[in-house]
Image (tube, rainbow, N blue to C red):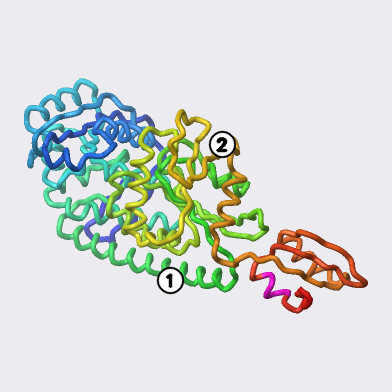
């Protein structure tokens, strides 16, 4: 996405350019800090694992990886992150491979990015910019596009200083799908004005969603939200449960805009199932803030299905990152079910206690999952009751059969006696037909 501000016109809105004549050549760079503090803060994710995840992200953005560099240091170099010697080595690799851009796994400071851009003489972006670029490609709804633009503007604003020449010549390409710059102070003012305007529009989205939620809550329909690490198979599970055709593939962040469909449970209760964006390590803070209006749907859900890829060697670490984001957005106390997906690819059985093992692609374990959802729902509770309904009232009889699990049915004179496991909403609607003799 390329946007240049004209001196005497309002700031243009970012536009997504999905047409690329060729894949961009990229070199990936990661820093391994060999300090005591870094060691204490280490997790199951090694630097090599993080670099491999960056590789997958870059491929998802349409890059062609030329080389990967891992630098070990005792401390971060304030000017270039890597140090002058390694930067010169990187410069030689960029020239030899004719790379179009260099992608750093760590977030770069504005000064580091400027220095590296000058020394390497090619575009330099970091992990945050890469993720923002992928989001810019995947946003389809107006709300999603607004949220991505807001995140991009908040990211670029502190990086405007000294970037007048390089940013004004930004063309299409990975990490360039964002606002550009021509005149520093003018653009700062226009970006701040645009940020304010987008914020108001997103507040409007939040208000509309609140109205929609109140309308849904007037009818006792529970909402189930799918959450999990990106590429855990949420969309495949969503399609399996709802018989939908939501885009589901191996690309990271294949699902960005939330999708909601109706789902019938074994008890015949109807619920709404929501598919949401996948989380990831080092999810940019600007994105978490920008997508708060969408993520509020997660907070309002009756139950969360935390889906993880149990065949992945680092699924425990993935799950911890998902839980951290859920805590950040205020969903810590929302009931959740752990769902271990891709069990058909799993070589071990060390799933956490209480997790439901499934394969969304083959359908294995789906019945158990539906039963677990049924048992976890507190909204519209189930209760066995008896209805005495006139045989002439076809609408009420149909309601029982469509919304309750019939246990026994028999005719008695002109009435139909039905014993069923029925939700509270149905019992309320048909209270005049509840058998007084029960």
Asked where in the image residue 90 lies, by quadrant, the reply is top left
Residue 428 lies in the magenta stretch: yes
Q: Mark 1 points at which residue?
A: 207
Q: Where residue 392 appears, x then y in whole percent?
A: 88, 71
Q: Residue at x 21, y 46 (%)?
A: 168
- Is residue 140 at all visible to an observer of this figure? no
Q: Is residue 94 above or below residue 146?
A: above
> Which of the 4 image quadrants contains residue 147?
bottom left
Say few, some or many: other residues with alpha carbon within 10 Å of mark 2 (under 14 / 14 to 19 / 20 or more): some
Q: Measured from the top left, where is residue 270 in percent x and y? A: 63, 60
Of 261 and 42, which appears nearest the observer? 42
Which one is in front, 40 or 318?
40
Residue 84 shows in this picture: yes
The magenta stretch spans residue 61 = no
Q: What residue lies at 26% left-to-right and 41% top-to-bottom? A: 127
The N terminus lies in quadrant: top left
Residue positioned 75% across, 65% down in the render:
400
- Magenta residues (range): 426-430
**How many numbered marks have been drawn onto this rendered protein structure?**
2
Going by the image, does 7 lie left or right of 271? left
Q: Residues within 10 Å of mark 1 (few under 14, many from 20)?
A: few
Which residue position is annotated with label 2?
A: 361
Secondary structure of residue under mark 2: loop
């Amino acid at each position: 996405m390329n946007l240049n501000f004209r001196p005497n016109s309002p700031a243009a809105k970012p536009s997504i350019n999905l047409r690329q004549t060729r894949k961009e050549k990229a070199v990936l760079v990661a820093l391994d800090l060999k300090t005591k503090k870094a060691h204490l803060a280490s997790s199951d994710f090694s630097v090599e694992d993080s670099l491999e995840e960056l590789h997958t992200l870059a491929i998802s953005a349409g890059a062609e990886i030329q080389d990967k560099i891992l630098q070990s240091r005792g401390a971060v170099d304030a000017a270039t992150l890597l140090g002058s010697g390694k930067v010169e080595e990187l410069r030689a690799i960029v020239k030899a491979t004719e790379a179009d851009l260099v992608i750093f796994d760590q977030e770069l400071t504005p000064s580091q990015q400027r220095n590296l851009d000058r020394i390497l003489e090619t575009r330099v972006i970091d992990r945050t910019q890469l993720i923002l670029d992928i989001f810019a490609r995947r946003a389809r709804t107006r709300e999603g596009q607004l949220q991505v633009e807001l995140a991009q503007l908040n990211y670029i604003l502190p990086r405007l200083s000294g970037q007048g020449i390089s940013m004004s010549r930004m063309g299409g390409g990975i990490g360039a799908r964002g606002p550009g710059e021509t005149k520093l102070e003018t653009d700062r003012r226009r970006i701040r004005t645009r940020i304010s305007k987008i914020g108001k529009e997103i507040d409007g989205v939040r208000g509309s969603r609140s109205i929609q939620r109140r309308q849904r809550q007037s009818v006792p329909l529970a909402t189930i939200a799918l959450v999990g690490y990106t590429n855990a198979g949420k969309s495949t599970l969503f399609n399996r449960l709802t018989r939908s055709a939501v885009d589901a593939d191996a690309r990271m962040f294949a699902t960005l805009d939330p999708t909601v469909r109706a789902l019938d449970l074994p008890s015949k209760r109807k619920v709404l199932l929501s598919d949401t964006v996948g989380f990831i390590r080092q999810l940019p803070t600007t994105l978490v803030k920008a997508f708060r209006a969408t993520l509020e749907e997660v907070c309002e859900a009756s139950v969360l299905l935390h889906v993880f890829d149990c065949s992945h060697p680092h699924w425990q670490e993935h799950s911890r990152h998902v839980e951290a984001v859920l805590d950040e957005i205020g969903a810590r106390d929302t009931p959740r079910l752990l769902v271990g997906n891709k069990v058909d690819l799993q070589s071990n059985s060390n799933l956490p206690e209480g997790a439901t093992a499934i394969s969304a692609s083959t359908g294995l374990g789906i019945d158990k999952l539906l039963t677990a959802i049924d048992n976890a729902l507190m909204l519209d509770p189930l209760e066995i009751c008896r209805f005495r309904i006139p045989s002439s009232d076809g609408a009420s009889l149909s309601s029982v059969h469509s919304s309750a699990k019939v246990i026994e049915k028999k005719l008695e004179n002109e009435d139909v006696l039905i014993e069923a496991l029925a939700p509270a909403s149905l019992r309320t609607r048909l209270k005049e037909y509840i058998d007084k003799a029960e």
